[in-house]
Amino acid sequence: MKNISFIFILLFCSFLMGSAYSEDITGANTVNSTSNNHTNQKKFSTNGTSLTITDSITLSTSSSSTVDINAKNNGIVTIESGSSITSTASNAIQGKAQSGLTIINSGTISAGSSKAINLLNAQSSSVTNNSGGIIKSDTNTISFAENSGTGNIVTINNSGEIYAEAVSSGVTSNNAIKSEADTDNITIINNSGGHIHNNNSADTVIKSATVYVAAASTGTLTNSGKIENKAGVNNYALGIAESGVTVTLRDKGKVIGKINVAGTGHTIKLQHGAGQAYFYDIDGAGTYDLKDLDGNPVVKGSAGSIGQGGNEMLDETLSYKSLNMRKSLIRFKKSEAYLNQDEWGEFFTTFNKRKENKSTLRLGSKTASFGANIIEPISENKNFILSVETGSLNISQGHDINKVGFLTGLHFNEVEIFNINPDLFILGGANYNKSDRNILTNTTTTGEYNITDSYENYEFLIGAKTNLNSLFPDLSLNNLSPDISLNFGYSYTPSHEESKYFKWEDKDIYNGSIALSDEYEIINNEKTNFYISWIADARSVLDDNVQVFYVNGVKGSYSQNNDLKKELSLSAGLNYEYKFSKNNIFLMSLDGLQTSQHTRGIQANLNYISKF
């Protein structure tokens, strides 16, 4: 009889304890500062049940499944900023054999051991972790599996922090997000500002990868934030397995740690922007396609692309140097120094801005330079030219090139060619270039790497100009007929190697252009010469302009888009020369530039001659 009484008392106490720690809920429910059930397990007992945690309240239990949604559809769990759902055991939130579950977190969801959120046989379910939201556990923080064989749609959209905080180097699996091999239709989005991380150096991907995505036939992962294995870059940050997983690495998003591919039919897409260089260490026996959505040339064998940077602009740089020299020669031939066969020189400073065009891989850039053109008469018909210039080229996607160079050669006032007697310049020179670029990579603890390079390139310019009247004397053109010129440029860059990952083969560039130009005097007297000048130039690259490069030893090539090989340029200037005295002359000019490659620029030139 005593034993029966003891059993009855024990069952009665168990009933009381059960009713104290488990609560069936239906409809709309709120746990707030006025509630007295902050430690009760919440079980959804009907479809369409919702639960909101607010007022910085923590709903916490020492048992598994603090919030339990089992076979009940269209449930909603909302955790507002400052509020929490925790379990000191596992499965702070469990959604099992249900459809349509929506979890929206702006506070904290945490489990003391595994699975802050466990989605088992979940259909059409979503987890949204807003900025400032935290989802954490020791291992497998968000886990989902599909055992029913009907397929599922699970979406995780993260703008906050999701992490597995246990430090592991052994058999323990502590992924921050993990899908089992029988899941399907998975979508994981890590937005800018989102941070998904773990700390695991286990030697198998399925145990150690920060994010492990296995799919029966299809799954997607898009990263614009940070995915990081804090155990070090030689450990796995991302693993994809089974079949049909598409990974898109976007914008300035970072992956810190290796990427492993197992299974078949996967795709890795890169969308970091036109001209952005990157290198990702990828291993595994799986198969995958590699695509750069911005059109950058990308090579497989891991995944790497190199922004063409200054190489893509060599033809334009060569053309602008030719334009600069031609405008300088115009000012020289309009000056008193030319008439008196005196030496002449000018300082110039140039600012150009080029607009990006992703469809043609035209890189955006800003150029600033300073230099001097010096002309020394050798004879009545021959002049020595020296041009020196230093400047910086700032290219989109964190690539800067500092340059210093010179050109030297001869200018002939007239050369007898087919009875048209053009003036002619021939110049050659060299440039020293120092490059500094920032790349995205999963091989450093910051997700970025700064690589440097220094290299030379050599240039040759030639141009011949005459008046249209000389070409077509029978047409009786008037004095307003412009000058016409033919111009040729050549640049050669020897092979060179950047400090990490990237190597370039040597490259030749051939440019040809035809131009019209003229000057119109506004004021011309003993003291003042004020005139307007202009040049309209049509340029084209004369070869294929192919650049061969290597990314971590894997060969690739870049062929310039045909739209970039041609350029129409119009430069117009105001030129003012003032004679203070016979021996003191001041010249100032201001030129504007507009091209069909959406480059706009301005150049200022100063000249002061004082004789003693």
Image (cartoon, grey):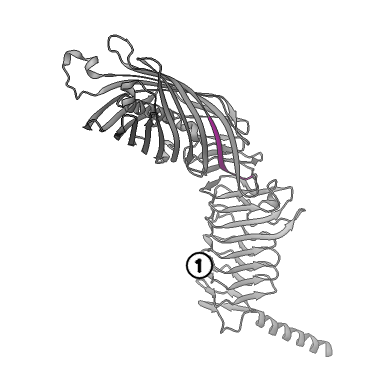
The answer to whether residue 357 of the structure is visible from this angle is yes
Q: Residue furthest right?
A: 2
**Residue 433 falls within the magenta-colored stretch:** yes
- Residue 24 to residue 185: above or below: below
Query: In the rendered image of this protein, does residue 338 appear above or below residue 447?
Result: above
Q: Is residue 236 magenta?
A: no
Q: Position of residue 216 (x, y in %)?
A: 59, 48
Asked if residue 378 is positioned above or below residue 49 in the image, the reply reads: above
Q: Quadrant of residue 38?
A: bottom right
Residue 266 in sight in this render: no
Query: Looking at the rendering, in which quadrant would you find the C terminus?
Result: top left
- The residue that appears at 60% across and 68% down in the rendered structure is 108
Which residue in the structure is indicated by mark 1?
Answer: 74
**Magenta part of the chain:** 432-442
Point 80% across, 87% down: residue: 6
User: What is the x, y in percent for residue 116?
Assistant: 64, 65
Q: For the residue carrying disc 1, how many other residues have a C-alpha within 10 Å: few (<14), some (14-19), or many (20+)? A: some
